[in-house]
Image (cartoon, grey):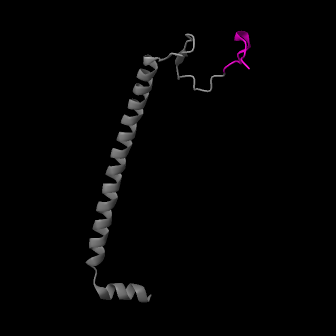
């Protein structure tokens, strides 16, 4: 059964508000057009957060390098102690 022209169900828009898609009707065809300015806004937003994430990773790399250098310094100081000192500390 074919629906009559006025009996089309209402279409809901499940896409987020920033998603823009215009759709027109041309007989059986349904041409669509994506709005380019929306992609420009999304690109700017992504770039801003990419830069922030990169800065966070650089800070994390710095902290990890400091921790590794501290661990190496502690390991070197522990190997310089004499075995008798370690034994005395362990026996207590």
Residue at the image point whose x is 32% and y is 61% from the top? 68
Magenta highlight: main SS:
loop
Left or right for 83, reference 49: left
Residue at the image point whose x is 57% and y is 15% from the top? 28
Q: Nearer the viewer, residue 45 or 10?
A: 10
Can you say whether 70 is above or below 2 in the image? below
Q: Specify the quadrant that holds the C terminus.
A: bottom left
Q: Nearer the viewer, residue 26 or 52?
A: 26
Instruction: Tell me residue 72's x, y (percent).
Output: 29, 66
Instruction: Tell me residue 4's x, y (percent).
Output: 73, 12
Q: Specify the quadrant that holds the N terminus.
A: top right
Residue at the image point whose x is 42% and y is 34% from the top? 49
Residue at the image point whose x is 31% and y is 56% from the top? 66
Region of the chain picked out in magenta, as a range? 1-11
Instruction: Tell me residue 55's x, y (percent).
Output: 35, 40
Left or right for 80, reference 27: left
């Amino acid at each position: 059964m074919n629906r009559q022209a006025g009996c089309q169900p209402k279409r809901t828009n499940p896409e987020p508000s920033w998603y823009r898609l215009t759709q027109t009707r041309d007989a059986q065809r349904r041409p669509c057009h994506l709005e380019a300015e929306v992609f420009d806004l999304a690109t700017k937003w992504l770039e801003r957060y990419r830069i922030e994430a990169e800065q966070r990773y650089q800070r994390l790399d710095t902290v990890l390098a400091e921790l590794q250098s501290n661990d190496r310094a502690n390991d070197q100081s522990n190997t310089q102690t004499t075995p008798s000192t370690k034994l005395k500390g362990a026996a207590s």
